[in-house]
Amino acid sequence: MKVPDDLRGVAARYGEPPLVPRTLSSPPERVRRLQRMEGGLLGAAGLVWNRGGRVLLVREHVASEGRVAWIAPGGMARPGEGPEEAFLREVAEETGLRVRILDLTFVFDLTVTDGQEEARGFLFQFEGLAEEGDPLPGRDVLEARWFAALPADMAFRGDYREAFESRRRRPQTLRFST
């Protein structure tokens, strides 16, 4: 599936990141709910860094994995909301922290299926830099904290490994511009 024209500007601002196909299994009721989303299936998530080179993760129930796990903050866009706005809002809701976007690492061409029905859309994977402060778990978040490394039990860990390692090699990029 091609990224719609109204979303291409977001990708272009960050140098056209790779478009990666992704299929996730989900229960039928979740697939039906995603099919009915006003404005279509659009999500945003990402690694949020602090100036000390640690990454912020939240512990919550991960619907597509059917378990509680550490995951990068993010979620679904609201009607009329773009991926950047969705990412910034979700991080604030889940952790109480404000973030400045650093990069867009991937755009996933997303298919969520129960084996018969499917919902199609896009997930934008960002990186951000948090303002100073301690994360506070928001609604539906069990815990929020900083990590020096990606935990082995992190949901979608493989999706973030490359971005995590790349940023760790460039710590000078973890500064707020004035």
Image: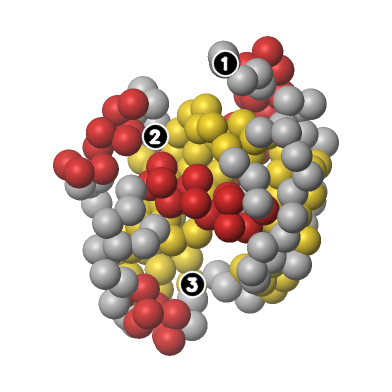
Identify the mark at residue 25; answer none if there is no mark: 3
Q: What percent of the width, then of the height, locates residue 75?
A: 50, 59
Q: What percent of the width, then of the height, locates residue 122?
A: 35, 53
**Tag 2 residue:** 18
C-alpha span from label 1 to label 3: 41 Å
User: Dots 1 and 2: beta carbons under 8 Å?
Assistant: no
Residue found at x 65% / y 18%? 175
User: Dots 2 and 3: beta carbons under 8 Å?
Assistant: no
Residue found at x 39% / y 26%? 14
N-terminal label among 1 and 3: 3
**Residue type indicated by callout 3:** Ser
Residue found at x 65% / y 51%? 96
- The single residue placed furthest to the right in the displayed view is 148
Q: Is residue 155 in view from this perspective?
A: no
Q: Is residue 93 above or below residue 108?
A: below
**Residue type indicated by callout 1:** Ser
